[in-house]
Image (spheres, rainbow, N blue to C red):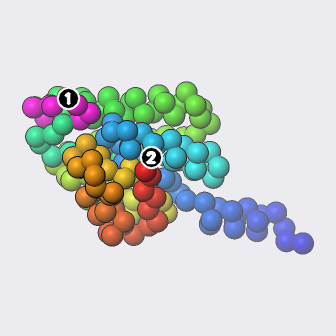
Amino acid sequence: MKPDNESEDRKMQQSPRRIVVGIDGSPPSERALDWAIGEAQRTGTQLFLLTAWRSPTAFGHTFASTQPQVHQLAQEGIDKATAHIHAIAPDVEVRGETVEHQSAAAALTDAAAEDDLLVVGRRGHGSFDDMHVGSVSEHCVRQARCSVVVVR
């Protein structure tokens, strides 16, 4: 029988260091967040929420025309997602960040470069309804250095 510290080491190696989640306020990103919450609870892993934009940008269904407005709306999205996590999974550690002047796809793959898991919705606000996977999701699957979960 192996000592407990070896099994703990193995468990630490199998669990992601953190789960990076793309947040844009769209229904697919909300489903991705819920999936990531379950995974974080199962693995005891921190969630890292990320919203990125380049101006001009629309968040949800609100068009923001100035940098301060865009930043405020992006931060409100992170805050709303964080409150959702605390309400249903108070034991899950969560951090969030907004990134300016970078595409969502590049920001997500950069943020997850040292992590084991990136979670995104299948498409965000900019995609056509009949697309199976949006451009951000496709970029993440093709370019991320870690595993990617695309949630429908």
Crowding at dot 1, Cα within 10 Å, few <14 / some 14-19 / many 20+, comes out as few
Q: Amino acid at mark 1?
A: Thr
Q: Which residue is mark 1?
A: 62
Task: Report how far apart the C-alphas of labels 2 and 1 lie in the structure.
Answer: 21 Å
Q: In percent of the image, x 62 and y 66: which residue is there?
A: 13
* Depth order, front residue of 34/15: 34
Q: Earlier in the sequence, mark 2 or mark 1?
A: 2
Segment tinted magenta in the rendering: 59-68
Crowding at dot 2, Cα within 10 Å, few <14 / some 14-19 / many 20+, comes out as many
The image quadrant where one finds the N terminus is bottom right
Q: In percent of the image, x 60 and y 60: which residue is there?
A: 15
Tag 1's secondary structure? Answer: strand
Q: Which residue is mark 2?
A: 32
How many marks the image carries: the answer is 2
Occupied quadrant, residue 143 = bottom left
Left or right side of 78 for 59: left
What is the x, y in percent for residue 21?
42, 49
Determine the residue located farthest toward the right in the rendered image. 1
102 to 33, vertically: above or below: below
What is the x, y in percent for residue 51?
30, 43
Does the image show residue 71? Answer: no
Task: Please tell me whether residue 39 belongs to the stretch shown in magenta.
Answer: no
What is the x, y in percent for residue 138?
31, 63
